[in-house]
Amino acid sequence: MSQDSLAHKKFRTGQRQSRVRKLARGTAERPRLSIHITNQQVSAQIINDEIGKTLVYASSVGKKNEGSMSIKAEAVGGEIAKKAQKAKIKQVVFDRGARLYHGRTKKLAEAARKGGLEF
């Protein structure tokens, strides 16, 4: 892949992310559930954008989640929901970043909904 096409790919990814983020702003009543999925790990955090603080964080790093990335995403979704319940957070705004709501992203969101989060 040439350097120009890689720069273009990063630019387009940034555009998609900005488009989603301008609609998904976290407040004290409804913080933002932001996800990050790499080739090997999954992480999610609930953020209050008004004060710029992460309220709850969950990740698959260091866990013994054997299996596919979909299984890791489901585990992180369930874990973030449990931690949010402890922090008395019930409603969130879902921020999928530059990713489509499909596959791993969808699995994480569905597991968080099962755990009691509303978005």
Image (cartoon, rainbow, N blue to C red):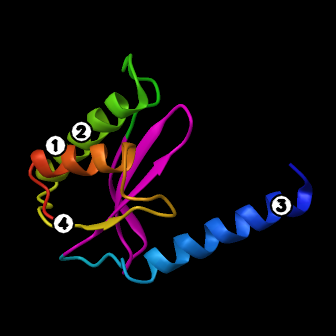
Give the extent of the magenta segment.
30-58
The residue that mark 3 highlights is 5
Of the image marks 2 and 3, the number of the one nearer the N terminus: 3
The residue that mark 4 highlights is 119
User: Alpha carbon of mark 2 to alpha carbon of mark 3: how far?
Assistant: 37 Å
The reply to whether discs 2 and 3 touch (Cβ–Cβ < 8 Å) is no
* Vertical order, 47 against 18 (above or below): above
Query: Mark 4 belongs to which amino acid?
Result: Phe
The residue that mark 1 highlights is 82
User: Alpha carbon of mark 1 to alpha carbon of mark 4: how far?
Assistant: 15 Å
Q: Does the magenta stretch include residue 60?
A: no
**Is disc 3 placed on a helix, strand or loop?**
helix
The reply to whether discs 4 and 2 touch (Cβ–Cβ < 8 Å) is no
Query: Where does residue 3 sit, x and y in percent of width and height?
Result: 90, 57
Of the image marks 1 and 3, the number of the one nearer the N terminus: 3
- Residue name at image x 38 percent, y 16 percent: 66
**Is disc 2 placed on a helix, strand or loop?**
helix
Residue 97 vs residue 4: left or right?
left
The reply to whether discs 2 and 1 touch (Cβ–Cβ < 8 Å) is yes
**Is disc 4 placed on a helix, strand or loop?**
loop
The residue that mark 2 highlights is 79
* Front residue of 35 and 57: 35
Query: Mark 3 belongs to which amino acid?
Result: Ser
Query: Mark 1 belongs to which amino acid?
Result: Lys
User: Alpha carbon of mark 4 to alpha carbon of mark 2: how far?
Assistant: 16 Å
